[in-house]
Amino acid sequence: MAEDLNIITGSKEEQYQSLLPQIKALIEGETDLIANLANITAALKEQFSWLWVGFYLVKNEELVLGPFQGPVACTRIKKGRGVCGAAWQNKETLIVPDVTKFPGHIACSSLSKSEIVIPLIKDGEVFGVLDVDSMSLSDFDNVDKKYLENILTQITNK
Ligand code: SME
């Protein structure tokens, strides 16, 4: 496996289409969850230069910080709290165009302006979430939802 990522310019859709097979190749021969989550965060951060890309994993009824790329972040989030806790509770992807308008948003960085959180679901249970933060308002839409959910199926179908 080549470990160099091929980073491209282009539309968001083109960037995801270039990245998807590379992420697939990175994780298909590896069974360790943390290793795979770590490489997914690195690949996404390198291609999109978002402020923060990372996973929180469910442990003892809390989300606990997992592999991430970006500034230091809060380590524990309770169910229903913040965007991550809400995506966990609702078992669905949440797109927040302006974090200041999301009731209960947890500000790990004052630089974060918009956010998307995608739950990792196996056998109907959420076992973690992918959280992505951007320094721009309204940076995430259904294109991100579609491709990030697709990337996470590489993990949840393993
Ligand atoms: N903003 C998130 C907390 C995690 S940090 O953004 C890394 C939330 O409201 O759940």
Image: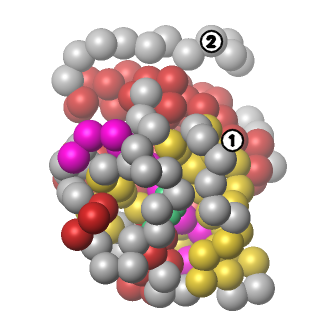
Among the two numbered marks 1 and 2 on one chain, the one whose residue lies closer to the N terminus: 2
Three-letter code for the amino acid on which mark 1 is drawn: Ala
Magenta stretch: dominant SS?
Answer: strand
Visible residue check, residue 134: yes
Secondary structure, mark 1, is helix
Q: Tell me, yes or no, whether the highlighted magenta stretch contains residue 125.
A: yes
Q: Tell me, yes or no, whether the highlighted magenta stretch contains residue 61.
A: no
Secondary structure, mark 2, is loop
Which residue is located at x 58 percent, y 61 percent?
Answer: 156
Quadrant housing residue 26: top right
In the image, which disc is placed on residue 155?
A: none
Q: Position of residue 83 (x, y in %)?
A: 41, 71
Give, as a single range, the part of the protein colored magenta. 123-137
Which residue is located at x 35 percent, y 67 percent?
Answer: 93
In this rendering, the answer to whether 73 lies above or below 90 is above
Three-letter code for the amino acid on which mark 2 is drawn: Asp
Q: How is the image coloured?
A: secondary structure
In this rendering, the answer to whether 156 lies above or below 147 is below
Mark 1 lies on residue? 38
Compared across the picture, whether 97 is left or right of 35 comes to left
Distance between the alpha carbons at the discs numbered 1 and 2? 15 Å
Mark 2 lies on residue? 4
